[in-house]
């Protein structure tokens, strides 16, 4: 007997059976022929050369040679777990998605990750963390592909290859930039001041989480929700950890990187194995769906901006519990494929230009990473609902499709696949007026304010949190070889806050520059949480 069979996306079957590929009592080739020896190659005599005709040797080594697939181009280092999401029913007035219904239970798979390090890099580096959730709903898969930081470096997805190139190892020496963020990273962010808000979060304690279990998650973009009557609202998704938000201090993170580079994955796996199931509450910030798509002057299509929770409280809509470790890291965590276009009725995208590029990028990269277009047939990606698409053939096709040629209407195949009815339209198709548009390559003027929110974030921090931010900037900028890059980043910090700039400048032994942008007046409040929850008074 072997391990208990657990479907990678479903619950344990309970039956102690061997999994596919491990059936029967005897060792075989992959074609099922029985083997009596897999320890000696076939040779011309005991001390002679190996024979080309040893088909088992060739098959065994061939398969081993191809065990690795490309790592993800970003978020390569990750760790996943299974769980369940239970809806509260509280979202019904704004969203008709079935999985948010009262008491509805949905299986989920979550993959946490760092962004810049390679698959074998350490867990507790200073970086943004991915928080990607696949909900296997009765209406198809819904993927919420978020991060632990509520804003992003750039406002337009066309800049994504550039920001990642700046952060990844240099092509000549392949010395990672992620951990020590050298010249190219700081060159990029100091010349793209829209990155300032994200950088402030990275340099704060949020950049070195204590555990995946103590991280918030954010959908970052604004999404459009649709209710049963066809009414729409705009919304941002938030995950709130039941254990609260906790971080490491820099010295702890450094030590742990050396002592236990797998610290975060071990922490998650151990917690689940011991029954201390981590939980996150899903919440929504909801905004009216107005033609301008702004809220209290904040452009909801700008992914470098948050909406403070005082202005739009996060309303709880369900609870996520991670309760089962993976059975096979490769089959599940490596092969899972998230995609922002995996939407269910009731949830739709907006015109955020970062989000729009992501809609293209994930499918495209998975075509290479998972070798062909059939990656939704891999067990971890399969929906827990019936699939009847018209896609055929391609690399790694596992389905044996019946019937005649797939086209519609098809009068020769009993009408199959049948037409969707108006009720089960797969995507949100609410009539939305399109803006009167001309083709342009430019950003709206509302994307131009790069300093107000970084300043709000800074002012919301406690003195010790501020000290950590100053030390992080000083340490990371201190790693730059280029004086001009350090000086340019100091000019950026001068536009965030004079004290922050002066303290970092002092640490670097450089003069503090004066601001070039007049800061907006902001009212800090000591009672606010860590998310920079104050808002300009003018
Ligand atoms: C992977 C989040 C922006 C391209 C990921 C993953 C997360 C994530 C969590 C890891 C998924 C996993 O665990 O398998 C985000 C967030 C973004 C963002 C929150 C901004 C708000 C972008 C943009 C692009 C992009 C703008 C491209 C234009 C990719 C690619 C992968 C990835 C190519 C690898 C996917 C794979 O190989 O399966 N992202 N990302 N991301 N992201 Fe993003």
Image (tube, grey):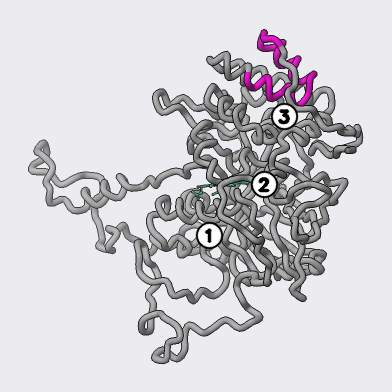
The location of residue 277, given as percent across then percent down, is 71, 50
Q: CA distance from mark 1 to mark 2?
A: 44 Å
Question: Are the two marked residues, 1 and 2, in contact with CB atoms closer than 8 angstroms?
Answer: no
Question: Neighbour class for label 2 at 10 Å: few (<14), some, many (≥20)?
Answer: few
**Is the residue at mark 2 in contact range of ligand 1, meaning its CB lies under 8 Å from it?**
no
The location of residue 388, given as percent across then percent down, is 49, 76
Q: Considering only vertical position in the picture, is 510 above or below 371?
A: above
Is residue 500 a member of the stretch shown in magenta?
Answer: yes
The location of residue 31, given as percent across then percent down, is 27, 63
Among the 4 quarters of the image, the one containing residue 40? top left
Left or right of 447: which side holds 61?
A: left
Q: Residue at x 90, y 38 (%)?
A: 537
Secondary element type, mark 3: loop
Q: Which residue is mark 3?
A: 204
Q: Residue at x 36, y 81 (%)?
A: 405
Secondary element type, mark 1: loop
Q: Nearer the viewer, mark 1 or mark 3?
A: 3
Q: Which residue is mark 1?
A: 8
Which segment did they paint magenta? 488-511
Label at residue 444: 2
């Amino acid at each position: 007997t072997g391990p208990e069979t657990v479907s990678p996306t479903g619950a344990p079957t309970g039956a102690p059976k061997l999994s596919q590929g491990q059936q029967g009592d005897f060792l075989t080739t992959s074609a099922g022929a029985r083997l009596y020896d897999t320890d000696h190659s076939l040779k011309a005599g005991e001390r002679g050369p190996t024979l080309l005709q040893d088909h088992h040797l060739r098959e065994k080594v061939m398969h081993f040679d191809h065990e690795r697939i490309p790592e993800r181009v970003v978020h390569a280092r990750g760790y996943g777990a299974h769980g369940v999401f239970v809806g509260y029913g509280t979202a019904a007035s704004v969203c008709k998605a079935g999985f948010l219904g009262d008491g509805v239970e949905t299986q989920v798979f979550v993959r946490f990750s760092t962004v810049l390090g390679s698959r074998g890099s350490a867990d507790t580096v200073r970086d943004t963390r991915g928080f990607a959730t696949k909900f296997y709903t009765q209406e198809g898969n819904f993927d919420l592909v978020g991060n632990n930081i509520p804003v992003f470096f750039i406002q337009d997805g066309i800049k994504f290859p550039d920001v990642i190139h700046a952060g990844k190892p240099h092509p000549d020496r392949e010395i990672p930039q992620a951990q020590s963020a050298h010249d190219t990273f700081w060159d990029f962010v100091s010349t793209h001041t829209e990155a300032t808000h994200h950088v402030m979060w990275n340099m704060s304690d949020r950049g070195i989480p204590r555990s995946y279990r103590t991280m918030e998650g954010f959908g970052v973009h604004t999404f459009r929700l649709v209710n049963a009557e066809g009414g729409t609202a705009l919304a941002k998704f938030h995950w709130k950890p039941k254990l609260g938000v906790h971080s490491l201090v820099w010295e702890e993170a450094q030590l742990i990187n050396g002592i236990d580079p797998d610290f975060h994955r071990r922490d998650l796996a151990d917690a689940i194995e011991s029954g201390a199931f981590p939980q996150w509450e899903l919440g929504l910030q909801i905004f009216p769906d107005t033609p301008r798509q702004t809220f209290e002057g904040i452009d909801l299509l700008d992914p470098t901006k948050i909406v403070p929770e005082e202005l739009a409280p996060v309303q709880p809509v369900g609870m996520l519990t991670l309760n089962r470790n993976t059975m096979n890291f490769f089959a599940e965590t490596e092969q899972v494929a998230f995609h922002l276009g995996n939407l269910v009725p009731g949830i739709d995208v907006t015109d955020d230009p970062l989000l729009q590029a992501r809609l293209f990028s994930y499918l495209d990269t998975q075509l290479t990473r998972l070798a062909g277009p059939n990656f939704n047939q891999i067990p971890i990606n399969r929906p827990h609902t019936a699939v009847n698409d018209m896609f055929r053939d391609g690399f790694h096709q596992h389905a044996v499709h019946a019937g005649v040629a797939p086209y519609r209407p098809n009068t020769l195949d009993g009408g199959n696949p049948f037409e969707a009815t108006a009720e089960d339209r797969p995507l949100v198709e609410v009539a939305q007026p399109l803006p009167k548009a001309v083709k342009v390559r430019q950003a709206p003027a509302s994307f131009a304010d790069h300093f107000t929110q970084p300043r709000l974030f800074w002012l919301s921090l406690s003195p010790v949190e501020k000290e950590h931010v100053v030390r992080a900037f000083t340490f990371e900028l201190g790693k730059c070889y280029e004086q001009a890059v350090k000086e340019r980043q100091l000019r950026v910090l001068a536009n965030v806050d004079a004290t922050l700039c002066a303290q970092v400048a002092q640490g670097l032994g450089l003069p503090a520059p004066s601001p070039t942008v007049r800061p907006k007046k902001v009212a800090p409040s000591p009672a606010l949480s860590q998310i920079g929850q104050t808002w300009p008074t003018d």
